[in-house]
Amino acid sequence: MSGDASLASTVLLVTREGLGSGGPELQLALMGKYLGLLLAGDLTPRALCFYTEGVHLVCEGSPVIEALRALESRGCRLLVCTTCLEFYGLKDRQRVGTACAMPDILSAQVEATKVITL
């Protein structure tokens, strides 16, 4: 895996605090592995959109913060739902990405050629 042409116009939706439906530790481990593979393969999605439980991943204490920072530094937009941050009481704990409203997330999805829910 190398090059990011196939993901350059792809938006990934992150709606959970990890990947899959296993236990929390497994979900976080899988998310870490997934993000690591994106970085190792030089794959940069157009955007990652975080909402519902997914907003926990961009906040203080998240084990994937550094991987998300690396993706952001490569030009991947990290869009984080402000309504969800407020709902979970995490507004002051966000450490990466751009807090935004649902219309911004919708716009990113509409502009994408492919949308993948993780």
Image (cartoon, rainbow, N blue to C red):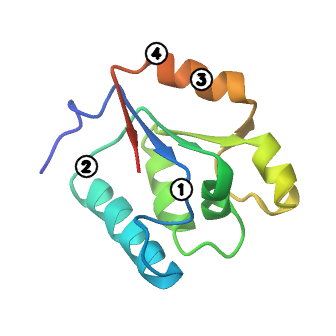
Residue at image point 25% right, 60% down: 40
Q: How many residues crowd mark 1 within 10 Å: few (<14), some (14–19), many (20+)?
A: some
Give the CA distance from mark 4 to mark 3: 9 Å
- Determine which of the numbered discs, if any, sits on residue 106 in the image: 3
Nearer the observer, disc 3 or disc 1?
A: 3
Nearer the observer, disc 4 or disc 1?
A: 4
Find residue 101 and report its image quarter: top right
What secondary structure is found at the residue carrying circle 2?
loop
Mark earlier in primary sequence (1, 2): 2
Mark earlier in primary sequence (4, 1): 1
The residue wearing badge 2 is: 42
Residue 7: percent from left, percent from top: 28, 34
The residue wearing badge 4 is: 111
What amino acid does circle 4 point to?
Glu
Q: How many residues crowd mark 4 within 10 Å: few (<14), some (14–19), many (20+)?
A: few
Looking at the image, residue 67 sits to the left or right of residue 10; the answer is right
Contact (Cβ within 8 Å) of mark 1 with mark 2: no
Give the CA distance from mark 2 to mark 4: 22 Å
Front-lying residue, 45 or 40 = 45
What amino acid does circle 2 point to?
Asp
The residue wearing badge 1 is: 69
Find residue 54 and report its image quarter: bottom right
